[in-house]
Amino acid sequence: MVSNQSLKFAIKEINSSSEYLPSIVQLGDANSATLGFLPHGAYKRLADKNRLLACINSEKVCVGYLLYDTSGYKVKLTHLCVHEAWRGKGIAKLLIQHLKQKTSYFYGILASCRRDYNLDRMWTSLGFSAVYERIGRSSTGSILTEWWLDYGHPNLLTELTKKAIEFRITAAIDANILALPYLW
């Protein structure tokens, strides 16, 4: 059981036989205008792969969920949805924290969000950084912002930067030495 602002929640992994799956699908359908359409079979498929997390309140009601998949070195966020009545209570943060713990061996989480939804503040409060933008698949050609939450694992560039800082050679050259060829 996780506590947040004196509220009690449980973050649960949901499988396809879970009693919470129908309410998760219903919550996703109710928010499809911002989440995008997702076939009901996709929820079941990802639940069977243990890629569905739900936030359950003390009354045993699903108040939010997170749906994701993995690809190579990254976690790809498909849905992050909190019931309208429960927004602003830190549920999205709890879901993201649980996902980070569960997938700590990956490099980070990638999420796509339409720029016109104006959710930049939410993503940054969850620890994400905007990394680039691209044109979405909608008929209007809306712009998607790609958000990245880095887990902080060292990579080739961080190691090279560290070595460059550690082994920096400091040298001074007298201006007369540089001017010497011009004097001859």
Image: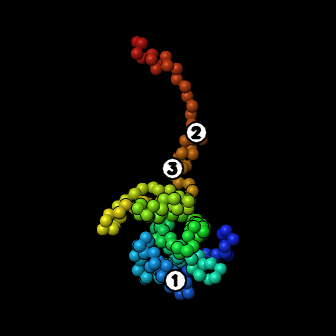
How far apart, in angstroms, are the residues tagged by discs 2 and 3? 15 Å
The answer to whether residue 166 is above or below residue 61 is above
On residue 23, the disc is 1
Residue occupied by mark 2 = 167
Amino acid under disc 1: Ser
Residue appearing at x 45%, y 61% in the figure:
118
120 or 38: which is nearer to us? 120
Residue 115 visible, this angle: yes
Which residue in the rendered view is the most extreme toward the top? 184
Residue occupied by mark 3 = 157
How far apart, in angstroms, are the residues tagged by discs 2 and 1? 57 Å
Q: Quadrant of the N terminus?
A: bottom right
Residue 5 lies, in percent from the top left, at 67, 68
Residue appearing at x 57%, y 77% in the figure:
63
Look at the image and name its color scheme.
rainbow
Asked which secondary structure carries label 2, the reply is loop
Question: Which badge, 2 or 3, comes first in the chain's sequence?
Answer: 3
Asked which secondary structure carries label 3, the reply is helix
Residue 115 lies, in percent from the top left, at 41, 60
Please identify, in this view, whether the residue under mark 3 or under mark 1 is nearer the observer.
1
